[in-house]
Image (tube, helix red, strand yellow):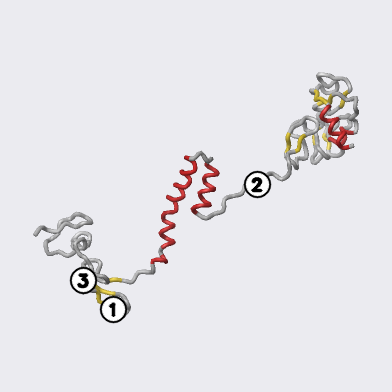
Amino acid sequence: MEDPICPACKIVNDEEAAYCDQCGQHLRAAAAQPKEGGCPACGSAVEIRADGDGVCSGCGLALVATPDQSCCETGGADSLMPERLAAAILQRTRAGVVLERAVAEACAEVLKVPAPTHREPEGSPRTCPLCAAENPAAAPQCAGCGIWFEHLCAPQACPRCERSVSAGGTCVCGALLTLPALLRYVEPSVRCVCSLCKQPYAVAQQKCPDCGGGMIGAERLKAYAASLA
């Protein structure tokens, strides 16, 4: 009979050895066909002790009762979670889904985390009646021409004389800083408005004679003023 080779560490052991001298692996485990309730190592009968645990009558292996399988299900699932999550993300990105959305959907599927809902900005964009720039609904000042839609919310340097203006809609030099101040001067004859000092002009010009700013056509502004009347 050949000397048994350990199936775990591949060390050759004596012919009579039941366990590996190197790692302790049972050398007959592969050949053993344990009966139901028998020793999983050698197949011999198991004697139940007073504490509820067992001991093999053949090889002396101590057998301890294991927890119910249901107690381990969560741990087993958690150990596979990274692989499942990565696979779900990869599946979506290969289908053309952008990475941010793919991650959110994968987390919702695998981790049972609700996907973030897309929130539309509150209110429609606010279109400046002077320069037509699109602004957030709650913007107090136009990002295009700089006019304040209602009133000054912070001190501002006058675009004409550079004085600091903190209240009112008009600078002492005559520059108009707010939309209500400008609308007081809008008449049917107005053809253009200075983009800097907001002075209205009845004669079309390329540049403002007061500050040198470029001109904006007044048709849009006049239509807005008419809608308020």
The percent coordinates of residue 149 (x first, y second) are 81, 38
**Residue at 17 percent of width and 65 percent of height:** 18
Q: Are marks 1 and 3 in contact (CB under 8 Å)?
A: no
In-image side of 16 versus 24 (left or right):
left
Q: Secondary structure at mark 2?
A: loop
Residue 204 lies in what quarter of the image? top right
Image vertical order of residue 81 relative to residue 184, above or below = below
Q: Earlier in the sequence, mark 1 or mark 2?
A: 1
Front-lying residue, 42 or 9? 42
Give how far apart the Cα atoms at labels 1 and 3 are. 16 Å
Instruction: Characterize the local packing of mark 3: few (<14), some (14-19) or many (20 or more) Cα atoms within 10 angstroms.
Output: many
Q: Nearer the viewer, mark 1 or mark 2?
A: 2
Question: In the rendered structure, which amino acid carries the disc numbered 3?
Answer: Ser
Q: Nearer the viewer, mark 1 or mark 3?
A: 3
User: Which quadrant holds the N terminus?
Assistant: bottom left
Residue 119: which disc? Answer: 2
Residue indicated by mark 1: 49
Front-lying residue, 24 or 134? 134
Give how far apart the Cα atoms at labels 1 and 2 are. 65 Å
In-image side of 132 versus 33 (left or right):
right
The percent coordinates of residue 2 (x first, y second) are 10, 58
Question: In the rendered structure, which amino acid carries the disc numbered 2?
Answer: Arg
User: Which quadrant holds the C terminus?
Assistant: top right
Q: Secondary structure at mark 1?
A: loop
Q: Secondary structure at mark 3?
A: loop
The percent coordinates of residue 64 (x first, y second) are 31, 71
Residue indicated by mark 3: 44
